[in-house]
Image (cartoon, coloured by chain):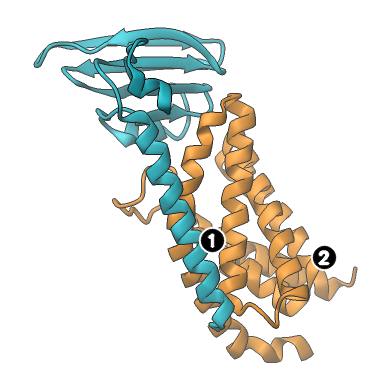
Chain colours: A orange, B cyan
Amino acid sequence: MKSKDIVVISILTSLALVISLIENYIYIPVLFPGAKLGLSNIVILFTIVIYGFKKSIILVLLKCLSVLLLSGNFISFLFSISGGIFSCLMMNFAYKKLANIFGYVGISVIGSFFHNLGQVLTAMIIMSSPEMIRYLYILNLIGLFSGTFVGIMSYTLVERLKFIRSI
Amino acid sequence: MFKKADYVLIFIIAVSSLLCIFLSSQKMYKSGEKYIEVKVDGKIIENINFNDEGVVSTYPIRSKYGYNILEVNGKKIRVIEASCPNKIDVKKGYISNVGETLVCVPNRMIVTIRGETEKNNVDIMVR
């Protein structure tokens, strides 16, 4: 790995971290407690489009580990890493194979769907209770809105920062 | 940014999750007297009955994962104290309808409001 790649990944990781830390302070009364907007997925989708699969996976891993170090909360680490890896893999797949069918919004909604699925599966395993699946339906409804927003934001970001590829 | 398939995808997810919410709440509503079921790690450890209006009582739930203190206030219940770091269950506040849950993942605790089912009722057999 070249030193340029290391710098790029560190910058993107810190961006994603700052966004997810700030997001913790946004209180939205409509959502039930525990649900988050997932705005840091803007950075992840951007990385997938501009830098490809490998860097995006490294970014997700680094982001989850840093959040663990900052918060010291192991259970939420399990949630963020299962959802993060799952959604990152599926967004990569969607971007590579289905990009002529789905736009950015579709890819991002797919990502948010699998993020929720990964988290609910983790919850079902931790709590050893299949009833947790009921949370998936509500999370998916909320995920539609945040997924659409993330898709629009990443599209705007990619359009404006395309030139970064050639640097 | 938007393609045709995106709208289709959003529509499918919205309809299917709304349908699932509707179906899973339907199943819960044919019920008589309500009670509270407390599960830790997938096992039922306590069943609590609701109080009369205006009576408040607290129930500590302790397990090897941590503790939660439940407060039953008349026909509604909430978690007032918990050993978990995020306190998501405390922030959720009161619940009172059949099928609603209070979940504390670090302590593996699920509090569900259930309706008492009458064994001889034909309606119950159908579901």
> Farthest residue in the front direction?
B122
Q: Is residue B113 above or below residue A69?
A: above
Tell me the mark number nearer the camera, choosing from 1 and 2: 2
Residue A117 numbered tag: none
Question: Which residue corresponds to the image point at 71% horizontal and 70% vertical from the top-left?
Answer: A94
- Mark 1 touching mark 2, by CB under 8 A? no
> Is A75 left, or right, of B92 in this rendering?
right
Name the chain under label 2. Answer: A
Q: Position of residue A157 (x, y in %)?
A: 57, 82
> Label 2 belongs to which residue?
A54
The image shows a total of numbered marks equal to 2
Q: For this rendering, which residue is in front, B51 or B92?
A: B51
Q: Secondary structure at mark 1?
A: helix
Question: Which residue corresponds to the image point at 25% horizontal and 30% vertical from the top-left?
Answer: B94
Q: Position of residue A97 (x, y in %)?
A: 77, 74
Question: Which residue corresponds to the image point at 71% horizontal and 65% vertical from the top-left?
Answer: A10
Q: Secondary structure at mark 2?
A: helix
Task: Give the residue type at disc 1.
Answer: Val
Q: Position of residue B47 (x, y in %)?
A: 37, 8
Name the chain under label 1. Answer: A
Q: For this rendering, which residue is in front, A50 or A96?
A: A96
> Label 1 belongs to which residue?
A18
> Farthest residue in the right direction?
A1
Task: Give the residue type at disc 2.
Answer: Lys
Q: Is residue A8 above or below residue B15?
A: below
